[in-house]
Every structure is written in structure tokens, then in C-alpha cells.
Image (cartoon, rainbow, N blue to C red):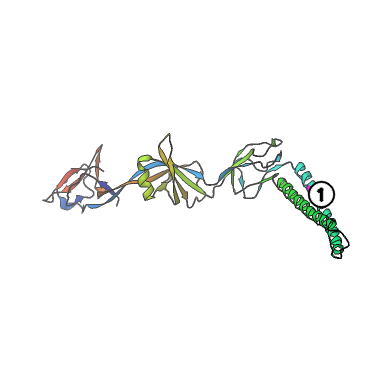
Amino acid sequence: MGRVAAAGLIVTLGLLALAAHGQQVSNAGAVTTVVVERGEFHEIVLLDGVIEAVQQSTVSAQTSGTVQSLPYDVDDSVAAGELIVQLEDSEQRSRLRQAEAGLEEAEAALTDARQRFERIESVHERGLVSRQEFDQARNNLAAARARVERATAAVSEAQEQLSYTRVLAPYGGILTERHVEIGESVSPGQPLLSGLSLEQLRVVVDLPQRYAELARSERQAKVTLADGRVLETGEMTFYPYANPQTHTFRLRMRLSDPNGTLFPGMLVKVSVPVARREALWIPTSGLIQRSEMRAVFVLDEQDRPRLRQVRT
């Protein structure tokens, strides 16, 4: 049986459930009576919330080049790690070959410097070469090692630049926007594609300032879809600042189970408790509504039903 909070009742002995809607009640014993309950009433405010993706981003170019292929288009589903943009990479491959050749040359020079140092070191121990020649051979070996390290770093950088020509999806999701076309030249930092993930969703709602303090302390909210389904919510986050234009605080809640039927941009209803007070609870079936008037039948001291106007 549904219940409703009623204000305006003082001390009552009982009320008539299923009370005569528009009928004259003459015998209170012929109908069912229910004792009025006093309990806590949670006042709520109903707000419009919007579903948004937790992961949504725009992938940008990290190297210069010409767009060679775009395997996926807008609204296509993409798995994590899939190739979504291929840039022309001849320049990057050429730089990598040059860096690798430089590394080979540096390694050969290091081998030569090491062999020369080892020969001079053995002769120096017998006192057959000067200290100056020994120091020079040792310094040449150290310089050769430094050149190898520099050449190795150049190869790593060239390999990284080459990898940037293959743009991969950072996570599985849907492509929402394409910012470039095939044959277009791009530079580092230029947006390429935008997308979002449907695996992690959340609800955001703007809470009026006058309700913010209690809502922040209660940390309770219920999210309901248009078809009446109640969504399970997870962690609740309150923004620590208000919107200067609307003077509202943003509330964000994670959805525990999107279940594949929810999409970013959908509207939902969010009910947030904003006040608590004591109230009298009566069965909904005992409430009589006539236009703007709401009333119930109450038994007086002689167990006679009397119509009592109430505010719900």
C-alpha cells in the first residue's frame, strides 16, 4: 500500500482507508481504519541530469606528415590499440636509417678506440709510452663511448617519431568526430579524431545553491530513466565551486552498470534529498482529491467519520 506524508492533522485516532470518494459515509464500522503513523519525511528535489562518457578525448598528431589512410569513420566502433590514422612515413624511415647508420659508425669507432687503449695500456704498464699518450687514448675511448650513447639516443628518437605515424586507439569506443581528411598535411598538436568509450558512463546534474550543503552531507541520490528504471550509481563527486552564471553546484555520479542501453547525451531524472522533517504518514488510498483540495476522513471521539482537509 502506498503512503503519503500529510501535514495539517493534529491528533487523530485513525482514518478511513478506501474512504468514500464522493459517497456519504454513515457507518464507520463498515470500512477499514488505519492508525496514522508519524515518521521522518525526506524532501527531495527532482532535477534533469545528463549522461556523459568518463573517457572522451581527441587524439592529436605527434609528428608531421600527410594523412595516408583513415581505416575508421565517424560512428564506427573501435577496439583499444586499433590503427585509426596512418601518416605517410617515408621521412621518418629515412631519419631512422640515418640514425642507425650513425650508431653503427659510432660503435665501430668505439671498438677501435677500445682496442687502441688496451694496446697503449699494456705498453704503458712497462713504461714504454708517455703518460700523455696514455691519457689521450683513455680520453678517446671515453669520447667514443659518449658518441655511441648519443647515436643510440638518436635511434630511439627516430624510432619514436616513426611510431607516431601510426595513431592507435587509446581505448575501445566509438569515433564521434573526424578533424582531418586523407591527403591532408598535419603538424604536431593538430587534432585528428575524437571519440568516447561506452564502457564507463556517469551522470552530471546541476544542483541549486540552496540545496548544496545538505546534499553534500547526505551524499544520496537516485537516478531514474524515462521508462521508470532506477540506475545503480557508484562514487558521488561534488564540484568544490559554483557556476558563476547559474550559481549551481555540479554533482557527478558514476554508473555502476551501463548495460549497453545508455548513451552519452541522454536525459535522466535525478532525485536528491534536500531536507528532513517529521510528518504524519497515511495510505495513499485514504486520500480524497477534489480539484485543489485534499482531505481524509478522520474518526472523532465518538468514532464518527469527519472530513479533514490536509496538505500533502
Name the residue that disc number 1 marks.
Answer: 101
Q: Which residues are magenta?
A: 99-104
The quadrant holding residue 145 is bottom right
**x and y, in percent, of residue 102 in the image:** 80, 49
Q: Position of residue 299 (x, y in %)?
A: 15, 49
User: Which residue appears farthest toward the right when viewing the image?
Assistant: 128
> Main SS type for the magenta part?
helix
Q: Position of residue 216 (x, y in %)?
A: 38, 47
Inspect the magenta stretch and tell me whether residue 96 lies in it.
no
Q: Secondary structure at mark 1?
A: helix
Residue at position x 56%, y 44% in the image: 56
Relative to residue 42, is residue 177 drawn left or right?
Answer: right
Q: Amino acid at mark 1?
A: Ala
Toward the viewer: 240 or 107?
107
Can you name the residue that lies furthest to the bottom here? Answer: 126
User: Can residue 100 be found in the magenta stretch?
Assistant: yes
In this view, the residue farthest toward the top is 245
User: Which one is in front, 174 or 162?
Assistant: 162
